[in-house]
Amino acid sequence: MKHIASSEVTFKSLQSWAGSSKLLYARHFFWISTTDKLQKSLSGLYRSLLFQIFQAEPRLILLACPRASVDSLGRKYYQNHAATDAGTTEGLKSILHRVSELVASSTPIDAKLALFIDGLDEYDTSEGGDPSDIAMVVKRLARWKNVKLCVSSRPWSVFSNEFGDGNFQVAIHQFTFDDMKRYASDLLNELSFFRKARQSDTRWTLLPHDIAEKAEGVWLWTSLVSKILVRKVAAGENYSTANAILEKIPQDLDEYFKELVGRSNEQYKGEGARILLLAL
């Protein structure tokens, strides 16, 4: 998604779509921080998108954000269809709704809006949320005229069900599967033990396929797991053991890293955790 969102080809295509209208362009990556819960929340999504939109078109700030006014009794109230507390998740949602409404109407600002949201499956549900929440946000935004969205996620059923039109879906992992399989195969075939073992036990030839299949398009997972299995195979493990190791490795990277830290020597856990934070 980072490549798509920053590609010159994408930008030129969107400029063509926008025509004479001003192109507004915003993106959000749910996965970009493993420690900041705000980054993985709806509030973080709204803040990120609104900041980029307002930076590109500051005139929308006064049009979309609530303005405090004082009535005849001296009480403060807010206008412009936004929630009273603009800093809350609901308030930010209302502001983004208003921005979409303004873009759809093309008045008083003639603009079109392109949004890129990556890693829907990384949305934080630890405080009572549900993946369907973020799916509904995407669907509501997509209904607006002059708004285009490009979103990505692992192939979870909740997203497949909500965004079920196959004409507008691209299964990236299907295009990268062969490359991942080849990567794992190349690493394993560097081992003379592997080359000899596959001659007597054809199940070894399935290992690169199984790695690529379980990766579900995640290159980092493919790389890490392939290297672990290479070390195990180099140590002389048989196919059944190697396959069992693969089966036990969590598909979720966060869970996998937690397991790695948990298995490490107590003396090095702190240092290992800091290295992972720096790497991610």
Image (spheres, helix red, strand yellow):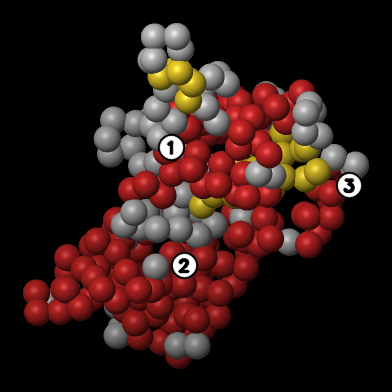
The Cα–Cα distance between marks 2 and 1, rounded to whole angstroms, is 26 Å
Mark toward the start of the polypeptide (2 vs 1): 1
Residue designated by label 3 = 16
Q: Nearer the viewer, mark 2 or mark 1?
A: 1
Say what secondary structure mark 2 lies in: helix
In the visual, does 112 lie left or right of 190? right
Residue 138 pos. (x, y %): 57, 32
- Which residue does the image show at 56% across and 67% down from the upper left? 181
Q: Residue furthest bottom?
A: 192
- Which residue does the image show at 33% across and 37% down from the upper left? 125
Say what secondary structure mark 3 lies in: helix
Of 156 and 58, the residue lying toward us: 58
Q: Residue furthest top?
A: 72
Say what secondary structure mark 1 lies in: helix
The residue type indicated by label 1 comes to Leu
Q: Residue furthest left?
A: 266
Residue 214 in view in this figure: no
Mark on residue 42? 1
Residue designated by label 2 = 220
Q: Specify the quadrant of the image occupied by residue 180.
A: bottom right
The Cα–Cα distance between marks 2 and 3, rounded to whole angstroms, is 35 Å
Of 116 and 162, the residue lying toward us: 116
- Quarter of the image containing the C terminus? bottom left
Q: How many marks?
A: 3
Of 192 and 49, the residue lying toward us: 49
